[in-house]
Image: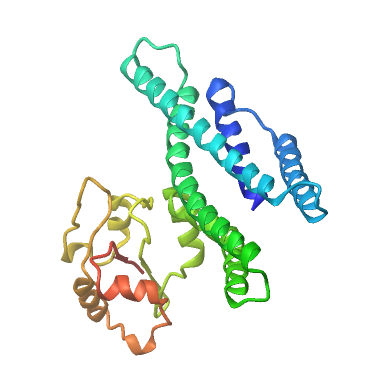
Amino acid sequence: MYAAGFHLTLLSIERATATIKSRVYEKSRGFVWVLLLIVLTWALSFVVIYCVQYSLVSPYIALGIIVVVDGVALAVMLVLFYVNHKMYHRVASEAKHSTHSLSQRYQFSENIFSSRLLKRLLLFLAGASVIAIISYFGFVFCGDQTTLGRVSGFVFDLTIASLTSLVPIIIIAGTPRLRHSTFDRMCRKPLFCGNPIYVPCSRYSPSRPVAHRWSRDPHRHQRKPIDHSGRNECLLRPAQVLLELNSRRYSFNHCQLIPSLQIYQLKVMSTRMWVSK
């Protein structure tokens, strides 16, 4: 719990550094600094836990530390969002005569995106902190001998433990590129009799140009590609895919197992698909 609060503060400091040193930040390599900050975060967390455990610091002060740390991170990210948004629009309006490099404009856009992502994280952590504080006070005032006290302690432990798994999920779900790469690694692509079907799991997925895949398709003269929204992808409805499979004498009885997510996409949704040999 304490490490999560310190992590948000360090992330806010990192974005502030990227804003101040936007000219050279993209080319900098700070592995040693990252390692030192990670060690410092966990060291501070252990110090706070030690002080609370041995009654050197009141538990209320420890909770106050969490509130202050989250408040500082929220204030810093709000200021960074305003500053980067203003600088990005100023650079975009003066693109022809601006002295800002491409790296600076990239850092401005990344800061805006990270500020929006951190806003979701802070809202989630604020809600989790409220639940944890209420359950903590319920455990303190009711004690571990009553049912309400034991339930409050269980809710507190469950809330704190869930932060470890839910925070990465929020980060992955809120980052299109990271979400796409994660789905590509986790979702096994189906094979129909050894012939792959391309089923992108994200609308941000990059794909090859239609002309390249069209030239390799043996049945390219029997149909025309459909191009939607300016994307270089061939869009086929599930019924068209099944007809295409049947025309090549493919049988679902000899197909490998498809993950449930891709079965849903294949049979229900109008998914982007391409059948290739």
Q: Nearer the viewer, residue 111 or 181?
A: 111
- Lateral position of residue 98 relative to residue 171, left or right: left
Residue that appears at 51% across and 54% down: 130
- Lateral position of residue 115 relative to residue 217, left or right: right
Residue that appears at 63% across and 63% down: 141
Q: Based on the displayed image, in which of its 4 quarters is residue 180 positioned? A: bottom left
Q: Report x, y in % for residue 39.
A: 76, 44
Q: Report x, y in % for residue 119.
A: 45, 42
Q: Report x, y in % for residue 251.
A: 31, 86
Q: Based on the displayed image, in which of its 4 quarters is residue 22 positioned? A: top right
The answer to whether residue 63 is above or below residue 105 is below
- Lateral position of residue 196 relative to residue 249, left or right: right
Q: Nearer the viewer, residue 40 or 133?
A: 133
Q: Nearer the viewer, residue 203 or 47?
A: 47
Q: Based on the displayed image, in which of its 4 quarters is residue 108 positioned? A: top left
Q: Report x, y in % for residue 99.
A: 44, 11
